[in-house]
Amino acid sequence: MAEREAFTAGVRPGGLTTSTEIRLLLCYLVQNTGAVSQHQLEAALMDTQLVNYFEIGSGLDDIRRQGLVDQDAEGLYTITDKGRRVAGELAYDLPRSVREKAVAAVLKAQLWSRKQAEYSAAITEGEDGHCTVRCTINRLDEKLFCLDLGMPDRLTAELVKKQFILKGNEIYQLLINKLTEEEKS
């Protein structure tokens, strides 16, 4: 693997600064987080400011061309035997804190993607600045639950959207419990 300086705009101190380090980290992440999309890797590594956006795409292309990962029809990356050997032998050259932070961030991004598929929320903004958040739960291609909530502004609506995606199941269970509980005499 040829080493070159990576583009580091948006990368915090302690982040990865060479293309070799980035490719090693990507192999390590694909090996340790299972099938993962480019979007999930981008979200995780940019959120933690470990790698620049452009370097992620370039690194993924490089390791795919080198046969270290495969990409399926849905765009998910999986590790190959060759990639597993490289990650096993060389990834420990990366700082442990970087590896741990990156794996935790990718797992969080994967969880977020799964939840977004089941729990969705869309924001509609009115002319007066008030917003409506439509919260929906989908199961097996069927709309199970839908609720519109009025919010005073975009910032509050974004918070409600994020929390519904994260906690939609809890919210739904609380609502069902309240709607089905017996009246106390």
Image (cartoon, grey):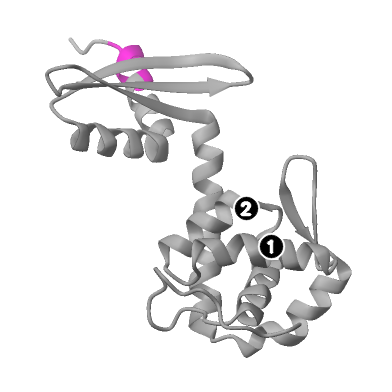
Drawn side of residue 175 relative to residue 129, left or right: right
Q: Main secondary structure of the magenta part?
A: helix
Label 1: element kind: helix
Q: Is residue 172 left or right of residue 139?
A: left
Image quadrant containing the N terminus: bottom right
Position of residue 76 relative to residue 1, above or below, is: above
Above or below, comparing residue 70 to residue 135 in the picture? below
Q: Amino acid at mark 2?
A: Gln
- Do labels 1 and 2 touch, CB within 8 Å? yes
Query: Looking at the image, which residue is at 24% across and 31% down?
Result: 157
On the image, numbered disc 2 is attached to which residue? 38
Amino acid type, mark 1: Leu
Name the side, left or right, on which 147 lies relative to 60.
Answer: left
Which residue is nearer to you in this view: 22 or 34? 22
Q: Is residue 34 above or below residue 84?
A: above
At a point 80% along the width and 46% down the height, the residue shown is 72
Magenta-colored stretch includes residue 18: no
Quarter of the image where one finds residue 170: top left
Residue lying at 87% horizontally and 73% vertically, measured from the top left: 82
In screen coordinates, is 135 left or right of 45? left
> CA gap, disc 1 to disc 2?
8 Å
Give x and y (percent) for residue 55. Answer: 57, 67
* Mark 2 element type: helix
Q: Which mark is residue 60?
A: 1
Which residues make up the magenta segment?
176-182
Which residue extends farthest bottom? 93
Total marks shown come to 2
Give the residue drawn at x 57%, y 58%: 41
Q: Which mark is residue 10?
A: none
- Quarter the C terminus occupies: top left
